[in-house]
Amino acid sequence: MPPRPTADVPSFPPGVLNVDKAAGETSFAVVNRLRRLTGAHRVGHAGTLDPLATGVLPILFESATRLAEFALRLEKTYVADIHLGYTTATDDAEAEREPVGDPGRLTADDLTQALTAFSGRILQEPPAFSAVKVDGKRAYKLARQGEDPRPKAREVEVYEVRLLEFTPGSKVHYHGLTAHWTLGVLIEAVTGRDFRDVIRETVAEPLGLGRELYVGLPESEFARTADMHEPTAKGDGYQPSAEPNTADWRRGGAPGGAGYGTARAMAALYQMMLAGGELNGTRIISPLSFFHSQVIVSGGPCGGSHLRAASDHFTGSPGSSPIIKSPR
């Protein structure tokens, strides 16, 4: 007869599952939910994400939980949207904002210079509303009880800190390409190279579109580029788009948006869409991304889309569907 199972035999295989944590959910809640779903005896994570934070949360199962202490030492990449001129009681967006000054005079150079103080080995003091323990209790629990916990400063190492975008002024502004820049930062963190070079060498060139499809347009190709237009405020015509026609926009690029391609590249794009995300038998985008581009962005099958472009000139797409001006 086969041996009887013992309590030492795990009910779920050991391993690591990367979870894309949604905003509003605690890391502890994710662990509890997966423990119930899998029936695993031991479940943990490799680093707490704040409830408002989104992104990869590695979940460790069974014997893989022993990797937690090593995973915590790995390099990590964070992207943050910061609204200057305000403070909150919780040091994040959960509490009411309290104005502390007018940031209207700040420039991108000011911020870049200020960020240098946060690079290298520095002492970082956790906020009162954090999961750090003070006298054996979570700091945020003490803070919510009206106490004023003072977590001790810890030494951390910041390998690089970079200003991705700055909108001067005093108004809240969310850039439409935030998700694209996040992807660019992740590509560079993984490869250690400029994301534009990675996309060109791994996507465009293998497809034979090295000089016909760009994310981030070289200045040598500016002469081949058509201006982009958009509807006027009154809806009685079209006008040149402001930001997308600038040199900085064309050079910058954004993975997943702000790409430039000739008519041949556009034809390859639509051929790929009609084939469900594949081109010449090679999958270019995942089924989920294909569904997103088909239904959520365009509202239906791509057969209803169209684009006008000259055969050897670039047209740009900032992630939407602009009207393309024929080049002079």
Image (spheres, rainbow, N blue to C red):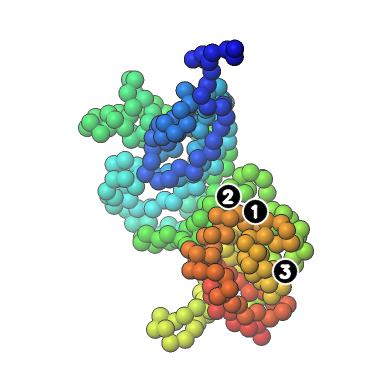
Residue annotated with mark 2: 185
- Along the horizontal axis of the image, is 219 left or right of 320? right
Disc 1 + disc 2, Cβ < 8 Å? yes
Quadrant where the N terminus is found in the figure: top right
- Residue 210 visible in this rendered orientation of the protein: no
At a point 55% along the width and 55% down the height, the residue shown is: 288
Q: What amino acid does circle 2 point to?
A: Val
> Does residue 281 lie above or below 271 as drawn?
above
Q: Position of residue 132 (x, y in %)?
A: 38, 28
Residue behind mark 3: 212
Which of the 4 image quadrants contains residue 14? top right
Q: Nearer the viewer, mark 3 or mark 1?
A: 3
**Element type at mark 3:** loop
Question: Disc 3 to disc 1, how far (Cα)?
Answer: 17 Å
The amino acid on which the numbered mark 1 sits, given as a three-letter code, is Phe
Residue 202 in percent (x, y) is at: 72, 54
Q: Residue at x 54, y 69 (%)?
A: 301
Say above or below: 252 vs 240: above
Q: Is residue 224 above or below residue 189?
A: below
In space, the residues marked 3 and 2 are separated at their CA atoms by 24 Å
The residue pinned by badge 1 equals: 195
